[in-house]
Image (cartoon, rainbow, N blue to C red):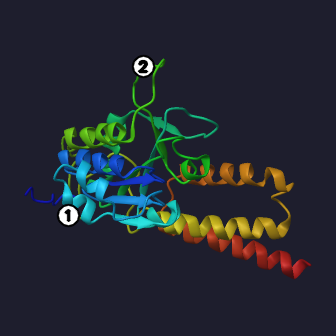
Amino acid sequence: MDAKPALQAPAILLVEPQLGENIGMAARAMANFSLHDLRLVSPREPWPNKEAYSSAAGARWVIDEARVYENVSAAIDDLHFVCATTARIRDNVKQVLSPQSAAAQMRARTGAGQRCGVMFGCEKAGLENDHIALADVLVMAPVNPRFASLNLAQAVLIMSYEWLMQDESGQLGRETAFDGPAREGVQMHRTRPATRGEMVGFFDHLERELDASGFLRPPEKRPHMVRNLRNMFQRMGASEQEVRTLRGVISALTKAHKRRV
Protein backbone atom coordinates (compact mmCIF):
# COMPACT_ATOMS: atom_id res chain seq x y z
CA MET A 1 0.00 0.00 0.00
CA ASP A 2 1.17 3.53 -0.78
CA ALA A 3 2.69 5.41 2.12
CA LYS A 4 0.89 8.53 3.24
CA PRO A 5 2.76 11.74 2.33
CA ALA A 6 4.65 13.71 4.95
CA LEU A 7 3.86 17.05 3.29
CA GLN A 8 1.07 19.09 4.90
CA ALA A 9 -1.14 19.01 1.82
CA PRO A 10 -4.39 21.02 1.56
CA ALA A 11 -7.62 19.64 2.99
CA ILE A 12 -10.31 18.71 0.49
CA LEU A 13 -13.80 19.69 1.70
CA LEU A 14 -16.84 18.17 0.01
CA VAL A 15 -19.87 20.21 1.03
CA GLU A 16 -23.15 18.26 1.13
CA PRO A 17 -22.02 15.52 -1.28
CA GLN A 18 -24.90 13.42 -2.52
CA LEU A 19 -23.44 10.08 -3.67
CA GLY A 20 -21.00 7.78 -1.93
CA GLU A 21 -19.57 6.81 -5.33
CA ASN A 22 -18.57 10.41 -5.99
CA ILE A 23 -16.90 10.67 -2.59
CA GLY A 24 -14.92 7.52 -3.34
CA MET A 25 -13.81 8.75 -6.76
CA ALA A 26 -12.78 12.06 -5.22
CA ALA A 27 -10.74 10.15 -2.62
CA ARG A 28 -9.06 8.18 -5.40
CA ALA A 29 -8.12 11.42 -7.19
CA MET A 30 -6.69 12.80 -3.95
CA ALA A 31 -4.56 9.70 -3.38
CA ASN A 32 -3.24 9.87 -6.96
CA PHE A 33 -1.74 13.27 -6.25
CA SER A 34 -0.62 12.97 -2.60
CA LEU A 35 -3.59 14.53 -0.82
CA HIS A 36 -5.15 12.70 2.11
CA ASP A 37 -7.14 15.11 4.35
CA LEU A 38 -10.76 14.54 3.27
CA ARG A 39 -13.52 16.43 5.10
CA LEU A 40 -17.23 15.84 4.47
CA VAL A 41 -19.84 18.45 5.37
CA SER A 42 -23.33 16.98 5.89
CA PRO A 43 -23.15 14.13 3.35
CA ARG A 44 -26.58 13.06 2.16
CA GLU A 45 -25.97 9.32 2.61
CA PRO A 46 -24.97 7.64 5.88
CA TRP A 47 -21.26 7.51 6.66
CA PRO A 48 -19.19 5.30 6.47
CA ASN A 49 -20.44 4.34 3.02
CA LYS A 50 -19.64 1.08 1.22
CA GLU A 51 -20.06 2.65 -2.24
CA ALA A 52 -17.36 5.17 -1.35
CA TYR A 53 -14.96 2.36 -0.50
CA SER A 54 -15.76 0.55 -3.74
CA SER A 55 -15.21 3.53 -6.01
CA ALA A 56 -12.05 4.66 -4.16
CA ALA A 57 -10.22 1.80 -5.94
CA GLY A 58 -7.70 1.12 -3.18
CA ALA A 59 -7.39 4.60 -1.68
CA ARG A 60 -8.84 3.14 1.49
CA TRP A 61 -6.79 5.22 3.92
CA VAL A 62 -8.34 8.43 2.57
CA ILE A 63 -11.84 7.07 3.24
CA ASP A 64 -10.83 5.59 6.63
CA GLU A 65 -9.53 8.92 7.88
CA ALA A 66 -12.24 11.14 6.38
CA ARG A 67 -13.92 13.39 8.94
CA VAL A 68 -17.58 14.41 8.93
CA TYR A 69 -18.78 17.87 10.02
CA GLU A 70 -22.21 19.41 10.50
CA ASN A 71 -21.38 22.70 8.79
CA VAL A 72 -18.70 24.50 6.80
CA SER A 73 -17.59 26.69 9.70
CA ALA A 74 -16.65 23.64 11.76
CA ALA A 75 -14.90 21.98 8.82
CA ILE A 76 -12.61 24.97 8.14
CA ASP A 77 -12.05 26.00 11.77
CA ASP A 78 -8.32 25.13 11.80
CA LEU A 79 -7.51 26.46 8.32
CA HIS A 80 -5.79 29.74 7.49
CA PHE A 81 -6.56 29.94 3.75
CA VAL A 82 -9.59 28.53 1.96
CA CYS A 83 -10.35 28.30 -1.77
CA ALA A 84 -13.91 27.90 -3.06
CA THR A 85 -14.38 26.20 -6.42
CA THR A 86 -17.18 27.51 -8.61
CA ALA A 87 -18.25 27.71 -12.25
CA ARG A 88 -19.50 31.30 -11.97
CA ILE A 89 -18.67 34.39 -9.95
CA ARG A 90 -22.22 35.23 -8.88
CA ASP A 91 -22.36 38.34 -6.64
CA ASN A 92 -19.23 37.59 -4.60
CA VAL A 93 -16.50 40.22 -4.69
CA LYS A 94 -13.42 38.04 -4.39
CA GLN A 95 -10.15 37.39 -6.12
CA VAL A 96 -10.50 34.76 -8.85
CA LEU A 97 -7.66 32.29 -9.45
CA SER A 98 -7.06 29.49 -11.91
CA PRO A 99 -6.38 26.05 -10.39
CA GLN A 100 -2.68 26.50 -11.17
CA SER A 101 -2.48 29.89 -9.46
CA ALA A 102 -4.46 28.65 -6.47
CA ALA A 103 -2.14 25.65 -6.08
CA ALA A 104 0.90 27.91 -6.27
CA GLN A 105 -0.50 30.17 -3.57
CA MET A 106 -1.35 27.20 -1.35
CA ARG A 107 2.14 25.77 -1.84
CA ALA A 108 3.69 29.06 -0.72
CA ARG A 109 1.38 29.35 2.27
CA THR A 110 1.94 25.73 3.29
CA GLY A 111 5.68 26.35 3.16
CA ALA A 112 5.12 29.22 5.60
CA GLY A 113 3.34 26.91 8.07
CA GLN A 114 -0.25 27.71 7.12
CA ARG A 115 -3.03 25.14 6.66
CA CYS A 116 -5.02 25.41 3.44
CA GLY A 117 -8.20 23.88 2.09
CA VAL A 118 -10.30 23.67 -1.07
CA MET A 119 -14.11 23.57 -0.93
CA PHE A 120 -16.28 21.79 -3.48
CA GLY A 121 -20.06 22.06 -3.59
CA CYS A 122 -22.69 19.36 -3.96
CA GLU A 123 -23.17 17.64 -7.32
CA LYS A 124 -26.50 19.32 -8.04
CA ALA A 125 -25.91 23.00 -7.34
CA GLY A 126 -22.34 23.63 -6.16
CA LEU A 127 -21.47 25.87 -3.24
CA GLU A 128 -23.99 28.29 -1.75
CA ASN A 129 -23.16 32.00 -1.41
CA ASP A 130 -22.94 31.67 2.37
CA HIS A 131 -20.29 28.96 1.97
CA ILE A 132 -18.31 31.06 -0.50
CA ALA A 133 -18.44 34.06 1.84
CA LEU A 134 -16.20 32.13 4.25
CA ALA A 135 -13.50 31.54 1.62
CA ASP A 136 -10.57 33.75 0.67
CA VAL A 137 -10.57 33.23 -3.11
CA LEU A 138 -12.62 31.70 -5.90
CA VAL A 139 -11.10 29.04 -8.15
CA MET A 140 -12.42 28.64 -11.69
CA ALA A 141 -11.05 26.13 -14.19
CA PRO A 142 -10.60 27.03 -17.87
CA VAL A 143 -13.42 25.08 -19.52
CA ASN A 144 -15.62 25.13 -22.58
CA PRO A 145 -18.10 27.95 -21.85
CA ARG A 146 -20.84 25.95 -23.62
CA PHE A 147 -20.33 23.03 -21.24
CA ALA A 148 -18.63 24.20 -18.05
CA SER A 149 -20.02 21.58 -15.66
CA LEU A 150 -17.46 19.26 -14.04
CA ASN A 151 -18.40 16.29 -11.90
CA LEU A 152 -17.17 16.26 -8.33
CA ALA A 153 -14.27 13.84 -8.82
CA GLN A 154 -13.08 15.72 -11.92
CA ALA A 155 -12.97 18.99 -10.01
CA VAL A 156 -11.06 17.38 -7.13
CA LEU A 157 -8.64 15.76 -9.57
CA ILE A 158 -7.83 19.07 -11.28
CA MET A 159 -6.97 20.76 -7.99
CA SER A 160 -5.04 17.72 -6.72
CA TYR A 161 -3.01 17.53 -9.92
CA GLU A 162 -2.12 21.22 -9.82
CA TRP A 163 -1.04 20.86 -6.19
CA LEU A 164 1.39 18.05 -6.95
CA MET A 165 2.77 19.77 -10.05
CA GLN A 166 3.94 22.82 -8.12
CA ASP A 167 7.68 23.11 -7.66
CA GLU A 168 9.11 24.26 -4.36
CA SER A 169 9.19 28.07 -4.30
CA GLY A 170 12.56 29.73 -4.53
CA GLN A 171 14.01 32.02 -1.92
CA LEU A 172 13.68 35.78 -2.26
CA GLY A 173 16.38 38.15 -1.05
CA ARG A 174 19.08 37.22 1.46
CA GLU A 175 18.45 34.94 4.43
CA THR A 176 19.72 36.07 7.81
CA ALA A 177 19.58 34.54 11.27
CA PHE A 178 17.15 37.30 12.32
CA ASP A 179 14.83 37.46 9.29
CA GLY A 180 14.83 33.96 7.87
CA PRO A 181 14.11 33.50 4.16
CA ALA A 182 11.83 36.00 2.43
CA ARG A 183 8.69 34.76 0.68
CA GLU A 184 6.08 36.26 -1.56
CA GLY A 185 3.13 37.80 0.22
CA VAL A 186 2.65 39.61 3.51
CA GLN A 187 5.39 38.90 6.04
CA MET A 188 3.90 38.22 9.47
CA HIS A 189 6.61 38.62 12.10
CA ARG A 190 5.73 37.62 15.68
CA THR A 191 2.16 36.78 14.65
CA ARG A 192 0.35 34.41 12.31
CA PRO A 193 -2.63 34.44 9.96
CA ALA A 194 -5.99 34.19 11.69
CA THR A 195 -7.63 30.78 11.57
CA ARG A 196 -11.10 30.39 10.15
CA GLY A 197 -12.42 29.81 13.67
CA GLU A 198 -10.98 33.14 14.84
CA MET A 199 -12.51 34.92 11.84
CA VAL A 200 -15.92 33.33 12.43
CA GLY A 201 -15.73 34.35 16.11
CA PHE A 202 -15.04 37.93 14.99
CA PHE A 203 -17.95 37.83 12.53
CA ASP A 204 -20.31 36.59 15.26
CA HIS A 205 -19.13 39.34 17.64
CA LEU A 206 -19.49 42.08 15.01
CA GLU A 207 -22.89 40.94 13.75
CA ARG A 208 -24.27 40.56 17.27
CA GLU A 209 -23.42 44.17 18.11
CA LEU A 210 -24.64 45.45 14.74
CA ASP A 211 -27.97 43.71 15.36
CA ALA A 212 -28.16 45.33 18.79
CA SER A 213 -27.44 48.76 17.31
CA GLY A 214 -30.05 48.37 14.59
CA PHE A 215 -27.54 48.61 11.73
CA LEU A 216 -28.54 45.35 10.01
CA ARG A 217 -31.98 46.51 8.91
CA PRO A 218 -34.41 45.95 7.30
CA PRO A 219 -34.55 42.19 8.02
CA GLU A 220 -34.85 41.18 4.37
CA LYS A 221 -31.54 42.90 3.55
CA ARG A 222 -29.63 41.43 6.51
CA PRO A 223 -28.27 38.28 4.75
CA HIS A 224 -26.82 40.32 1.87
CA MET A 225 -25.33 42.93 4.24
CA VAL A 226 -23.73 40.18 6.37
CA ARG A 227 -22.18 38.51 3.31
CA ASN A 228 -20.77 41.85 2.13
CA LEU A 229 -19.22 42.51 5.55
CA ARG A 230 -17.70 39.01 5.70
CA ASN A 231 -16.29 39.28 2.19
CA MET A 232 -14.79 42.67 3.00
CA PHE A 233 -12.98 41.44 6.10
CA GLN A 234 -11.92 38.16 4.46
CA ARG A 235 -10.13 40.12 1.73
CA MET A 236 -7.82 41.78 4.24
CA GLY A 237 -6.11 38.49 5.16
CA ALA A 238 -6.05 39.40 8.85
CA SER A 239 -3.51 38.16 11.37
CA GLU A 240 -4.62 36.75 14.71
CA GLN A 241 -3.37 39.96 16.36
CA GLU A 242 -5.47 42.07 13.99
CA VAL A 243 -8.57 39.99 14.77
CA ARG A 244 -8.01 40.51 18.51
CA THR A 245 -7.58 44.26 17.89
CA LEU A 246 -10.79 44.46 15.86
CA ARG A 247 -12.72 42.66 18.58
CA GLY A 248 -11.27 45.06 21.14
CA VAL A 249 -12.44 48.00 19.03
CA ILE A 250 -15.98 46.57 18.90
CA SER A 251 -16.03 46.04 22.67
CA ALA A 252 -14.74 49.56 23.34
CA LEU A 253 -17.31 51.19 21.07
CA THR A 254 -20.10 49.14 22.64
CA LYS A 255 -19.10 50.15 26.16
CA ALA A 256 -18.84 53.82 25.15
CA HIS A 257 -22.30 53.71 23.58
CA LYS A 258 -23.81 52.15 26.73
CA ARG A 259 -22.25 54.86 28.92
CA ARG A 260 -23.72 57.60 26.72
CA VAL A 261 -27.14 55.98 26.83
At 18% across and 45% down in the image, what residue appears?
32
Nearest to the observer: residue 257 or residue 143: 143
Name the kind of residue labelled 2 in the image.
Asn
Q: Secondary structure at mark 2?
A: loop
Classify the position of the C terminus by image quarter: bottom right
| Residue at left offset 82%, top offset 70% | 212
Q: Is residue 166 above or below residue 60?
A: above
* Outermost residue, bottom side: 259
Amino acid type at circle 1 is Ala
Q: Is residue 113 visible?
A: yes
Instruction: Determine which residue is flagged by label 2.
Output: 144
Residue at the location (32% across, 35% down)? 100
For marks 1 and 2 on the same chain, the one whose residue lies earlier in the sequence: 2
Is 260 above or below relative to 24?
below
Is residue 246 toward the left or the right of residue 143 in the image? right
Identify the residue position indicated by label 1 in the image. 177
Residue 109: x percent and y percent? 33, 52
On screen, residue 163 versus residue 234, left or right, reads: left
Q: CA distance from mark 1 to mark 2?
A: 50 Å
Residue 1 to residue 91: above or below: below
Residue lying at the far right in this picture: please name it.
Answer: 261
Residue 227: x %, y % from top left: 66, 51
Quarter placement of the N terminus: bottom left
Mark 1: secondary structure: loop
Q: Which mark is residue 28?
A: none
Q: Picture coordinates of residue 188 (x, y %)?
A: 39, 60
Q: Could you say where residue 10 lies in the image, as x and y percent from the top left?
A: 31, 54
Q: Crowding near pointer 2: few (<14 within 10 Å), some, many (20+)?
A: few
Question: In this figure, what is the number of numbered marks?
Answer: 2
Q: Is 154 or 194 nearer to us in this picture? A: 154
